[in-house]
Amino acid sequence: MSRKAQAVKLLDEQGRRVDGRLPDEMRPLKIEVGKLKNADGSAYVELGNNKVIAAVYGPREVVPRHEALPDRALLRCRYSMLPFSVAERKSPQPTRREIEISKVVREALAPAIFLEEYPRTAIDVYIHVIEADGGTRTASIIAAATALADAGVAMRDLVAAVAIGKIGEVLVVDINGLEDQYGDGDMPIAMMPQLGEVTLLQADGVFKPEEIKRALEMASKHIRYIHSVQVRALKETYAKVEEGEVVG
């Protein structure tokens, strides 16, 4: 284990992590759909201490019009962390990291959407991190994909995501804030699990080829579980609609 990881005791003698989880154990996941009445689709995600809400508007007219694409929809994503989402108050102005994650989320979602079905329109995805504790980009992808499905946007598959971390020589799934800050590596992975396609793979840190293979295997297993939670949340919401209950 690295000195950095040892300094905050990220793994104990029994191999348990700072929050008591085993290396191959996710934090609790909760997904709620249709929470925002004024959006075309919305989803709220709790992943451990992370709290993220995503809203989708569209397909709708592109403003400004000159940005419209003649053969497909324009997908726009904006990721933002609210000022009170972290311990030390954050400036409301978008940071370079937020701009970068907005682009990453859009690129992770785009392969799943039939953009060609909606030419000359825009699909806007707004993601707000209410509370952050490591893994906000993967929680945001989960929320955004679920919100797109709630909006009725035609998709090849839902996109689900999880981050694989590295503590010394140990790979761990779904890293929290301390593991993100003091661990030895971070690999966010997004997939369309029913199609078996990877839509995002980033890496911060050094991963050996065999570790990358193992990380993909770990991510694939947990992404299938996340996908099942997304599907269940969508089905439960529309079951309530069919029964005449008010959603949101």
Image (cartoon, rainbow, N blue to C red):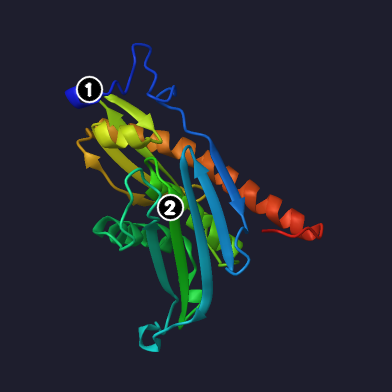
Question: Residue 234 or 208: which is nearer the viewer?
Answer: 234
Q: Earlier in the sequence, mark 1 or mark 2?
A: 1
Residue 100's quadrant in the figure? bottom left
> Badge 1: few (under 14), some or many (20 or more) residues near its Cα, within 10 Å?
few
Q: Is residue 100 left or right of residue 219?
A: left
Check disc 2 and give the amino acid type. Val
Residue located 36% across and 29% down the image: 172
Q: How many marks?
A: 2
Q: How far across and how far down the image is residue 139, in percent?
A: 45, 47
Q: CA distance from mark 1 to mark 2?
A: 28 Å
Residue 97 is situated, as x and y percent measured from the top left of the image, at 27, 55
Question: Can you say whether 133 is above or below 11 in the image?
Answer: below
Q: Is residue 233 left or right of residue 138?
A: right
Write the residue at 41% across / 38% down.
219
The N terminus - image quarter: top left
- Side (left or right) of 165 relative to 74: left
Reading the image, the residue beneath label 2 is 129
Residue located 47% across and 72% down the image: 123
Q: Position of residue 49 (x, y in %)?
A: 46, 39
Q: Nearer the viewer, residue 76 or 88?
A: 88
- Tell me which amino acid carries mark 1: Ala
Secondary structure found at label 1: helix
The residue indicated by pointer 1 is 7
Picture layout, residue 235 above or below residue 2: below
Label 2 secondary element: strand
Residue 133 vs 183, above or below: the answer is below
Q: Is residue 168 visible?
A: no
Q: Of 229 and 140, which appears nearest the observer?
A: 140
